[in-house]
Amino acid sequence: MDKLSVLVGSRIKEIRESKKIKQNQLAELIGIEPTNLSKLEKGVHLPKEETINKLTRSLDCDVKDLFDFKHMKSREELLKSIESILDNSSTEEMQFFYKILVSYKELK
């Protein structure tokens, strides 16, 4: 498994779950076996162009969405990025970010 396969697979799974689509449902929509979709999501295989096109239609997303990995960072990288954002934010912006985080945590 190469890093690209793993990242694309993670994005497929992330988008599928955000759309509340079960793995077997998506597999049926794109015409592959659920075990093959599982392999794609785990990064065992990189999807072929035809499968990418079926995925984007079924998930109602753009091809670029499958290759958007900017948020897929390690915990340490995320903390550094967040710290940088906060360092360059006004007090009002920080209060707003805080409200968002607290609200999100309360939903869980």
Image (tube, grey):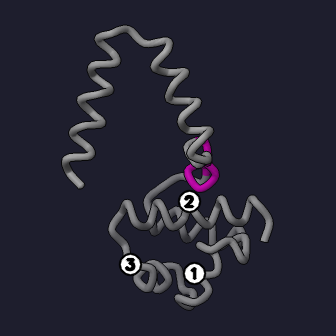
- Residue type, mark 2 in image: Arg
Q: Secondary structure at mark 1?
A: helix
Q: Amino acid at mark 1?
A: Leu
Please identify the quarter of the rendering in which residue 50 is found: bottom right
Q: Position of residue 10 (x, y in %)?
A: 58, 63
Q: Hey, which residue is sitting farthest top in the picture?
A: 90
**Disc on the earlier residue, 1 or 3:** 3
Q: Earlier in the sequence, mark 1 or mark 2?
A: 2
Which mark identifies residue 37?
1
Identify the disc placed on residue 11: 2
The residue range painted magenta reads 64-70
The residue tagged 3 is: 22
Give the quadrant of the N terminus: bottom right
Image coordinates for residue 82, horizontal then vertical, percent: 50, 29
Quadrant in the rendering for residue 81: top right
Q: Residue at x 58, y 89 (%)?
A: 35
Can you say whether 31 is above or below 11 in the image? below
Label 2 CA crowd tier, 10 Å (few <14, some 14–19, many 20+): some
